[in-house]
Amino acid sequence: MNPVVNQPQFGATTGYGTRSDWQTGIFDCFDDWGICLCGTFCALCLSCQIAADMNECCLCGGSVAMRTLYRTKYGIPGSIYNDFFWLYCCPNCTLCQLKRDIEKRKEMNAF
């Protein structure tokens, strides 16, 4: 049995044939005050909004699996380890980043 050493690159393109990156940084919380306030005072609500956007169970929105799924779907560079690290160290900022990215991709009709 061979160990898996590379993360699969499912959906490694954005649909336009190029790799992507996060639309905002992890600490750019003030780019969208509504998302920032929701993530600060009701992270569970924000997590459920993210899950609903991605047609998943409400309890999955703030998970490493959800962030990894989103990142691989849009070809955003990173790893499962990085997803875990950011969600463990800065969970609210990480949720806000994911929701901001979803909203920006919706505006561009790329979600």
Image: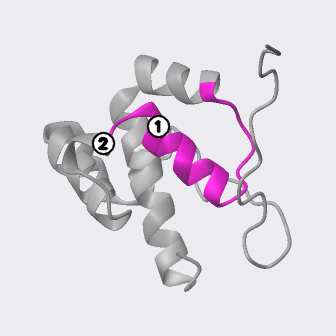
**Residue where numbered disc 1 is placed:** 65
Check if residue 72 falls in the magenta segment.
yes
Which residue appears at 22% of the width and 38% of the height? 40
**Left-right relation of 10 to 54:** right
Residue 3 vertical position relative to residue 11 in the rendered view, above or below: above
CA distance for labels 1 and 2: 8 Å
- Mark 2 lies on a secondary structure that is helix
Amino acid type assigned to the residue bearing label 1 in the image: Ala
* Number of other residues with Cα within 10 Å of mark 2, as a class: few under 14, some 14 to 19, many 20 or more: some
Residue stretch rendered in magenta on the structure: 62-80
Looking at the image, which is closer to me, 42 or 56? Answer: 56
**Residue where numbered disc 2 is placed:** 60
Examine the rendering and report whether any part of residue 22 can be seen: no
Amino acid type assigned to the residue bearing label 2 in the image: Cys
Q: Pinpoint residue 60: horizontal percent, then vertical percent.
A: 30, 42
Looking at the image, which is closer to me, 12 or 96? Answer: 12
Which residue appears at 59% of the width and 79% of the height? 110
Asked if the residues shown at circle 1 and circle 2 are in contact, with their CB atoms under 8 angstroms apart, the answer is yes
Q: How many marks?
A: 2
- Mark 1 lies on a secondary structure that is helix
